[in-house]
Image (cartoon, rainbow, N blue to C red):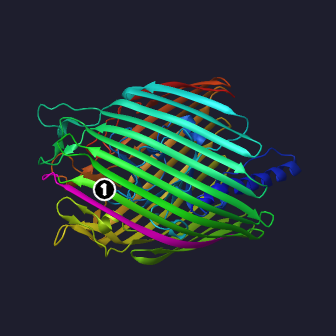
Amino acid sequence: MGARFHLAAASAAAVIAAVQAASAQQSEPVVLPEVSVSATGIATPLDQIGSSVTVITAADIARTQRRTLPDVLNNVPGLNVVQTGGPGGQTAIFMRGTNSNHVKVLLDGIDIGDPTTPNGAIDLAHIATGDIERVEVLRGPQGGLYGANAIGGVISITTRKGEGPAKATATLEGGALGTFNQSAAVSGAKDRFDYAFSVAHLRSTNIDVTPTYVLPAGQGANPNSYDNMTYSTRLGAKVTDDLKVNLIGRYLDARLKYTNDDPSTFPTAPYATRSDYTSKAFFGRAEAVYAAFDGRFINTVGVNVSDTQRTNKDPNANPETTNDGTRTAVNWRGEIAVAKGHTLVIGAERSDERAKTQTYGAFTGTPISYSASNGNTAGYVEIQSQFAERFFIVGNVRVDDDDMFGSYTTWRVAPAFVVPGSETKLKGSYGTGFKAPTLYELYGVGDYSYVGNPNLKPETSKGWELGFEQPLFGDRLRFGVTYFRNDIENLINSVFTPVNTYVNVGKAKTEGYEAFVDIKASDRLRFRADYTRTGATDEIANTELLRRPKHKANVTASYQASDALGLSASVVYVGPWMDFDRQGLWFTARDFQGYTVVNIAANYEVNKQVTVFGRVDNLFDKRYEVPVGWKAPGVGVFGGIKVSTL
């Protein structure tokens, strides 16, 4: 599936070229359209898309000075980001009320999900942002294009490619939490070759995470310590006018020392000393892009590889827990310009995943291990059409043939219509999705006599949305509302009798709406406000799903005070939600209060080669826990300098 994201450059270039040509004929300034790739697989202007998608650019990330992906995603509507404490803490993403394992995450088209995690949920804590060009958050079931594990939606990350003259950059940053970050990058393009290399080091040595109320009497809290080294490269070579090859690689080596719970105590309480967790991962892709018939038929063949290794050592006599997982995929994609305004996309993919884990019984200390593998073959087709000047529609269907549970078909249709005169955009979509059982759920063994269930079937969903967007005053003001609903069946839940395993017994409904107002007060000043109302219900137990706040709102402002000085601010409000109570019985859930956090940032360009920056996170030192039982960082001041050769 990765090919679509690298074809984006060619498709986006075509969109931009058309705008430039039209502007040249009219002798008007060029205004480039905002585009999305994830919604259709083809670079498409946002005003032609029927799905809900948020695009975050490298400029947005630099302006707000967000260093990891969880921090970037905090302001996205429809998302609830849950991270245990701060930098490096385990992170879960809940999209539109669906489960944390219902979000598919792609890095340059590579599925970066970890095959070794029990429920398949993806931990995004270790994704550094220094080399990221854009992040797209596509909401709603996306099985018709992306296959398994996209019930809630898709997060697509694209890294920066080399362009223009050779350029080198370096950044230093320090501040609260014992933070000392450094990064360096070299990029450029010459003749038929482009290149980008980067290295980033994130370090925080004093992260206060553990609330005093969960500590045993007389035991002090140990702060977390986090260290992350990330190396990335992206190379491209135009072999001929019609053939280009690309290589992408990313390696991360992260270590978190943290206060873990001792399972041998009841109720559980933190160890007196810290646990040691490491995460090492490699993500790579090699591809060839060939344009035939004067560019009307673009073929992409690619190979994806991901390899993850995680270890965890509790402060006891047991050896460390180890988790090793790999995923490989071979894919082909063809993009065919059938006629003006009509593009056909067809593709096929074969993927295989393997997992090997070893852990130890909480009470016995005896080793527990398993190894398993599974594979999937898929084919898909999509048609994107413009039937009239103001009517756009995309439809897709995909068949996945899983080696374990057999075939499953998903589809999606998303129309958009712009009303003449008022320029109101009416949009909607309907789609299906499914979540494949994980290797652990199918074949795993674990503590408390757990055994996997090879008879599990995939979780399934049907979802739709309907909304509008209204521009006013030449698009200086835009507002809109989108209603969404998702019905999920065959949810995989754990049971303890007669056997400790997983079964398909769950059923859930999520629904709500997203509303926004975007104001371009001037060329230098912009405001945006988002509000999300989410209801997420367990339809079997008739209870509220955990860690899905009913209300979320955020306001962002950016102000270019002068050519040199840029300012930004954000306010995030998360309403009350249900969560487990870490103090006492783990299986007890109750309501917990919400919180409001204010962040501010400033960037000052001393000259074209030197920029100084600073930010204050949690300006008013709000004390809150997400999830409950792990303290979020208090007020923190950070600052640094960036230098470049151009």
Q: Is 251 positioned to the left or the right of 387 in the image?
A: left
Viewed as shown, does residue 598 lie left or right of 481?
A: left
Q: Nearer the viewer, residue 80 or 215?
A: 215
* Residue 276, position as x, y percentages in the image: 29, 39
Q: Residue at x 50, y 35 (%)?
A: 200
Percent across and percent down for residue 462 are 45, 72
View extreme (top): residue: 606
Crowding at mark 1 (Cα within 10 Å: few <14, some 14-19, many 20+): many
Quadrant in which residue 48 is drawn: bottom right
Residue that mark 1 sits on:
357
Magenta stretch contains residue 380: yes
Span shown in magenta? 362-384
Quadrant of the frame with the C terminus: top right
Vertical comparison of 64 with 9: above or below: above
Q: In which quarter of the image is the N terminus?
A: bottom right
Callout 1 amino acid: Thr
Disc 1 is placed on an element classified as: strand
Asked if one can make out residue 593 in the rendered structure from this viewpoint, the answer is no
Query: Is 284 above or below relative to 616?
Result: below
Q: In this view, does 347 lie to the left or right of 580?
A: right
